[in-house]
Each structure stands twice: as structure tokens, then as C-alpha cells.
């Protein structure tokens, strides 16, 4: 389902009694111009219908119940991936990230298993600025969504991002501005004592530990980046992990030692991986759903200003 307006509300399907459940995984994956027309993206391996099915099966194999995605070129390919993951899987895609050719999109969104989690609401953060400090930012507006675990009623917010790419000074300035604005948005949300503290920002940060986005998002002491369970790359071109999770310190259901990159180490295997999947590897974390420990909390909709 495409996020064509600022807000998307989804009513709760039904209620289940609270109970302790097994661990669940959530994750993020940049799927490298999924669905792009090869005529406009000659440097990206084209994907066939069989490849979309293989990607969907890989999503299922990851064991995730929510997967944030980046570089999605239209609603159709993402729906095909969700369908291949299984009949209970659903897809939501933002509207931004259009390229100047008007044929290519680098959209962000997510797929999720509706048999495990209920989508409470989703929102594309269209109010985020397109210019800060004289530089263009947020070409790909973040998408946020709130989920409720059906068995335990544990609920949480995810924010899916794809920050500016590149290593030039201008790119670094843009990423710093994006991360600073994102942290201020989180700070504003959490000024309300009723706001649910279970928040994770995940996606392609195009930066790693020690870079400005980490410094900006961790400043103030509310958020923290997760360390890798086993240090590993998240993209095939270099070893620096750029796909990350940044979680609120109060989000106690997240297992801090569970960050895993599902990478391919063998160079030949990487070539084959990219032909079907992406130049990025999926990353996941583990959560232990508990009986909702903050049942009075709320999830803000729209700008908190």
C-alpha cells in the first residue's frame, strides 16, 4: 500500500490476551533499486520475476516480522516481494525519492507479517524539510510506523531512513543536517511524557560508528547505536557497516547483543548475491516481546510541533 498522504491509519483487527511469546526479529535491507527500469539503471543488475520471488523468500528466511527497506522503485515490485514472503505479508512504501529522470524512485518503506504484528499506523514524514543550512536534505523522506505484537500486545515504533550517500564534504554536511533534524524530531516526540519510548531508527545511514550521524543521534543520551554481534560489512563494496540500528535506551525489549549482518564473505558468492538480491546485505536485531510494560503510552501522529 502506497503512502499517498501524510497519515495512514489502520484500525486494530482484534485483541488477543497478553502472553509471553518467543523472540522476534526486525530488520532493514537496502534492496538496490528494486524494480528499476534497466534502461535507466544500467549499472544495477536487472531483476526478473523469479528474482523478486527469491527476494521474498529471503525475507522469510531472515526470520523477521518487520523489515524496513530502501531503494524501492515503485509499489508493484515491493508487493511482489511481500507476496513471495507469504500470504500474510503486507507492503507499505513512501512516495518520495524520485530521481530527475521521473522514471526512477529510491523509496523507503517496509514489509511486515500481519499474522505476527498488527500495523497500528504508518506515516511518511513529509513535513521534514528539503533544505537545511543551505543544503538539500531528505530527498527520501523517512517513514515511521507503529506495530503491536499480537500475542503479547507489546508495541513499538520504527523509523526507516535512507540518509544522503557519498563521501564529499557536501555529502557529509547533508548527513549531519539530516541526523540533527531527526534527533530534534525524536526529542520533540519525547517531550510528551505519554509518548511511547520504544523507538528504533533503522536503515541505510551511509555512515558508521564515530561519524557525525552517530554523534548527532546519540547526543543528549536518549538514543544509542547497537554494536554488531559479530563485526561484519553491510554492503559488498567495503567493510564499513553503514546499515544500522539506533534505539531508544528505554526500549528494553531489544536485545542489545543481537545485531547481525547477514553478509556474504566469499567474493564470488557476493557477485552471485548481487545478481539476485542487492549490493547491500540485510541486517537484523532480536526483540523479546513482553506484556506491554507501558499500556498508557501513546504514539504521536503528525508533526509534534
Image (cartoon, helix red, strand yellow):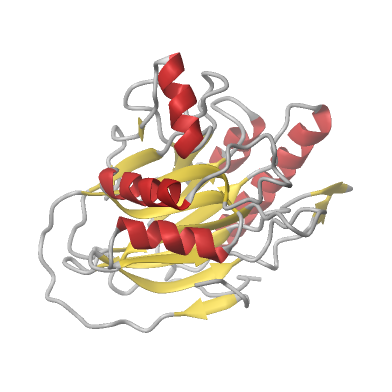
Q: Residue at x 36, y 32 (%)?
A: 262
Q: Quadrant of residue 152?
A: bottom left
Q: Is residue 62 above or below residue 158?
A: above
Residue 145 image offset from top left, x and y in percent: 46, 65
Q: Nearer the viewer, residue 131 or 85?
A: 85
Q: Residue at x 41, y 35 (%)?
A: 226
Residue extending farthest right:
134
Quadrant into which the C terminus falls? bottom right
Q: Is residue 107 above or below residue 120?
A: above
Q: Is residue 233 above or below residue 303?
A: above
Q: Is residue 160 left or right of residue 305?
A: left
Q: Nearer the viewer, residue 275 or 141?
A: 275
Residue 98 image offset from top left, x and y in percent: 73, 57
Residue 134 visible in the snapshot: yes
Residue 220 visible in the snapshot: no
Q: Is residue 221 left or right of residue 291?
A: right
Q: Residue at x 52, y 28 (%)?
A: 235
Q: Quadrant of residue 292?
A: bottom left
Residue 72 image offset from top left, x and y in percent: 57, 53
Q: Is residue 206 left or right of residue 250?
A: right
Residue 13 image offset from top left, x and y in percent: 28, 82
Q: Is residue 243 left or right of residue 169?
A: left
Amino acid at each position: 500500500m502506497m503512502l499517498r498522504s501524510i497519515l495512514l491509519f489502520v484500525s486494530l483487527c482484534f485483541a488477543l490476551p497478553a502472553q509471553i511469546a518467543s523472540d522476534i526479529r526486525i530488520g532493514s535491507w537496502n534492496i538496490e533499486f528494486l524494480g528499476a527500469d534497466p534502461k535507466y539503471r544500467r549499472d544495477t543488475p536487472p531483476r526478473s520475476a523469479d528474482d523478486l520471488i527469491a527476494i521474498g523468500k529471503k525475507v522469510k528466511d531472515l526470520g523477521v516480522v518487520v523489515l524496513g527497506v530502501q531503494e524501492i522503485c515503485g509499489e508493484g515490485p515491493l508487493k511482489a516481494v511481500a507476496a513471495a514472503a507469504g500470504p500474510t505479508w503486507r507492503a507499505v512504501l513512501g512516495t518520495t525519492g524520485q530521481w530527475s529522470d521521473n522514471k526512477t524512485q529510491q523509496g523507503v518503506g517496509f514489509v511486515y507479517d500481519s499474522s505476527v504484528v498488527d500495523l497500528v499506523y504508518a506515516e511518511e514524514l513529509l513535513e521534514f524539510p528539503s533544505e537545511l543550512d543551505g543544503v538539500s536534505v531528505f530527498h527520501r523522506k523517512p517513514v515511521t510506523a507503529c506495530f503491536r505484537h499480537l500475542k503479547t500486545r507489546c508495541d513499538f515504533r520504527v523509523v526507516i531512513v535512507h540518509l544522503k550517500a557519498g563521501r564529499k564534504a557536501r555529502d557529509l554536511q547533508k548527513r549531519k543536517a539530516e541526523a540533527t533534524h531527526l534527533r530534534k524530531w525524536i526529542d520533540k516526540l519525547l517531550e510528551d511524557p505519554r509518548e511511547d519510548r520504544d523507538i528504533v531508527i533503522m536503515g541505510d545511514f551511509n555512515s558508521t560508528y564515530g561519524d557525525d550521524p552517530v554523534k548527532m543521534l546519540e547526543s543528549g543520551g536518549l538514543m544509542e547505536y547497537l554494536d554488531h554481534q559479530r563485526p561484519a560489512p553491510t554492503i559488498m563494496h567495503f567493510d564499513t557497516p553503514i546499515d544500522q540500528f539506533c534505539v531508544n535506551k528505554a526500549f528494553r525489549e531489544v536485545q542489545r547483543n543481537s545485531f547481525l549482518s547477514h553478509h556474504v564473505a566469499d567474493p564470488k558468492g557476493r557477485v552471485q548475491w548481487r545478481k539476485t538480491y542487492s549490493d547491500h546485505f540485510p541486517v537484523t536485531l532480536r526483540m523479546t516481546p513482553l506484556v506491554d510494560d507501558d499500556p498508557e503510552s501513546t504514539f504521536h501522529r503528525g508533526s509534534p510541533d
